Amino acid sequence: MEETHNKIESAWVYSLKKKILFGLLGLLGVYFIILTSIVVFFAKNTCYDEIKGGVQELSTVIESSLKHFMLTRSPYLKQAIEQIVNNKDTISSIIILNNKGEVAYSTSQGEERRVYDNKKEVFCLGCHKAGGSLLPRQTTEIKNNQGEKVLRHVSVIYNEPQCRSCHGTARTNGKLIVDRTQARSSALTLKMVLIIIGSGLFCILLLIPLLSMKINRYISEIINQNEEINLLYAMVEKLSKTINIEELKAIVADIFIDCLKAEEISIVMPKRSGKYSVYTKPMSTDEIVRRKVEADDPLMGMINLWIEGKLNSFTISRDKRDIYMNISKSGEPLTLINAKKHSAPFQIKRVELLEALSGHIAIAFENSHLYALAITDELTHLYTKRHFRYTIEKGLVSADKTGKGLSLLMIDLDDFKNVNDSYGHIVGDFVLESVAQCIKDSIRENDIAFRYGGEEFAVILPDTNVSVGRIVAERIRKNIENAVFAQDGLSIKMTISVGLADYKKDADVSSQELLAKADSALYEAKWIGKNTVVVRDNRHGE
């Protein structure tokens, strides 16, 4: 089940990581596309303006040179133009037309004397609209006869007064057509685009592992926080399930072990007159047991501080292998919890999580304490008759599950009425309280004692057969018989009568029937002379 859960979680993490990574890469891709488009747009416009200005400037230079050479009748006009063309390697072609459209000069061989029709020739329609005006545009982007994109600048050569001696009275002498290629600007733009794309790909390839690491870290944090929230919720839910102190101790021990991976949990419970009980649960077992704390145990020092009210609410040792949580309410100590880990220090995050849970633990122990007060007899400090009914029913269910059986003792003080009649009810209460303490001192850790009513007591012995039950009953009887209850100069001796009945798995005996058997045995003990134990073995009936 856990392996399936891990596989589902891994698939979910991988899917989330893939979505985030591709989303970020998609954003980066869009960013580089926009950046490239902007660069291409501005680069192209800049190059276009530069070429346009250059071709206009070149046309002006050629036109001035042309006028100079024509006025001086120099024979070097062609050589001068060719020299200009050779120095400007971006020039695609230069053509001079006379006013009849005949080529007077061309950088392309075989073009001289050719006549262009500006209404039909592809060469001319780039500037002249078909069927439109014969006036050309000044500078236009066109495709020449070779299909190459060029910027064409057309200058009209006007027939100025000094030229009319050779050209007559016509308004114009012809046109100067200069084509400048955009190949270099296109190559430069392409180069810039390739550089941007290359840089973008390099950045993306460089960012992929970094992004992957960051995403892994964030996902891990999300998973850890989710686990912590689920764990916290589960722990709070467990704490709220019971107000029984025995069940609560086991739940708290499990919470500390599960959350901290603690190897041993000790729970210290306060008792009257500064006394305490210590219960321990190692990680390797499912059972929480009572233990004695030796004087040299570090826990003993903490217990002393706890009893004196000098222990902080949360303490962790320097090596982070011991944690002490002091659970109290309004200055009243409820419990002291000690978690140990010998193999490695505790994880601080888990410690902080558990520290945040201390308030819930305090509430759980306070509720358990209040519940204990509600089910505890005020005089004898034993459990009440009402709690007896709940416990006996629960004990029978457990006996059926484990098959270990259960024994019930019914105890009555012999001739207790004489104590009240002779010494009064205050002394009588003292005797009842002392007898109750004697019973508690005589039974085992898991045995449960009750004040059933008046001077009558009951003891439930879980996981106990009739022979062991008889031993416990005899120990109680002897301890009370040998005890001396002294107060205000009085020394009082008491005896008890005990009725014992046992329950075995599948015996089909109800709690009322078991109680009736133990009660019958008690009255028989009274009838045969008191200060004795009578057994009603379930195998033999009454």
Image: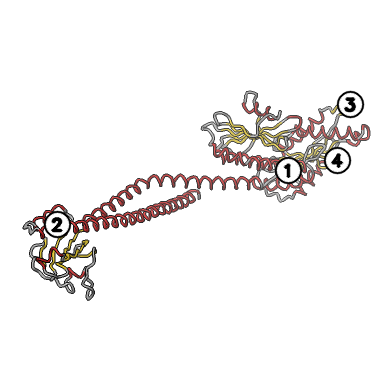
For numbered disc 4, what is the local secondary structure? loop
Q: Is residue 269 visible?
A: yes
The reply to whether dot 2 and dot 1 touch (C-beta < 8 Å) is no
User: Circle 1 sits on which residue?
Assistant: 502
Q: Position of residue 227 (x, y in %)?
A: 54, 46
Instruction: Using the image, tell me which numbered label, if any, was put on residue 16.
Output: none
Q: Find the distance from the CA under tag 2 to the CA under tag 1.
A: 133 Å
Q: Position of residue 12 (x, y in %)?
A: 46, 52
| Above/below status of 530 relative to 121 | above
User: Circle 2 sits on which residue?
Assistant: 65
The reply to whether dot 2 and dot 3 touch (C-beta < 8 Å) is no
- Amino acid at pointer 2: Ser
Q: Earlier in the sequence, mark 1 or mark 4?
A: 4
The reply to whether dot 2 and dot 4 touch (C-beta < 8 Å) is no
Q: Position of residue 194 (x, y in %)?
A: 28, 52
Callout in the foreground (4, 3): 3
Q: Is residue 216 left or right of residue 176?
A: right
Callout in the foreground (2, 3): 2
For numbered disc 1, what is the local secondary structure? strand
Q: Earlier in the sequence, mark 4 or mark 3?
A: 4
Q: Give the camera-side residue of 474 and 535.
A: 474
